[in-house]
Amino acid sequence: MTDGYSVWLVIVTCEAMKATAPPPEKTLRRLVRYAEFYRDLAATIIRRCEDVDGKVWVRETDVVAAQGARGVLGQTIQTLDRV
């Protein structure tokens, strides 16, 4: 992921993928289907300065917090900074 200035490696854990939506599968198709959702989570993590050495970890807790903030997946997550 890049913002034009920096490049981050975004790592989506298996647990995060399983928590995203039923059925719990960890496939390339799921990564592509929810790429915008994971991108928005990664952007929030970067804004919070929680990246580590250029790596951003998207974890199950991030997904659960985002689901609670918006209630529905598939919509752009822009309010995560308030979570």
Image (cartoon, rainbow, N blue to C red):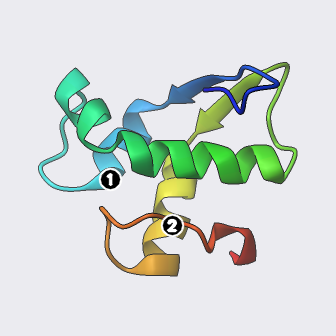
The reply, left or right, for residue 68 in relation to residue 3 is left
67 lies left or right of 11: left
User: Is 49 above or below relative to 67?
Assistant: above
- Looking at the image, which is closer to me, 24 or 58? 58
Evaluate if marks 1 and 2 touch, with contact meaning CB atoms under 8 Å apart: no
What residue do we see at 62% from left, 74% from top?
79
Kindly identify the amino acid type of the residue bearing the numbered disc 2.
Ala
State how many labels appear: 2
The quadrant in which the C terminus is found is bottom right
Q: Residue at label 1? A: 20
Q: Quadrant of residue 67?
A: bottom left
Residue 70: image x %, image y %?
A: 45, 78
- Give percent across and percent down for residue 14: 38, 32
Element type at marker 1? helix
Most foreground residue, 33 or 27: 33
Mark found first going from the N terminus, 1 or 2: 1
In the image: residue 79, left or right of residue 24:
right
Tag 1: amino acid: Thr
User: How many neighbours does mark 2 have within 10 angstroms: few (below 14), some (14-19), or many (20 or more)?
Assistant: many
36 horizontally vs 20: left or right = right
Mark 1 nearby-residue class (10 Å; few <14, some 14–19, many ≥20): many
Label drawn at residue 66: 2
Secondary-structure class at tag 2: helix
Residue at horizontal 51 percent and vertical 65 percent from the top? 77
Residue 2 percent coordinates (x, y): 67, 27
State the image quarter where residue 78 is shown.
bottom right
- Which residue: 59% across, 27% down? 10
- Mark 1–mark 2 Cα distance, whole angstroms, equals 10 Å
Q: Give the number of the disc on residue 61.
A: none
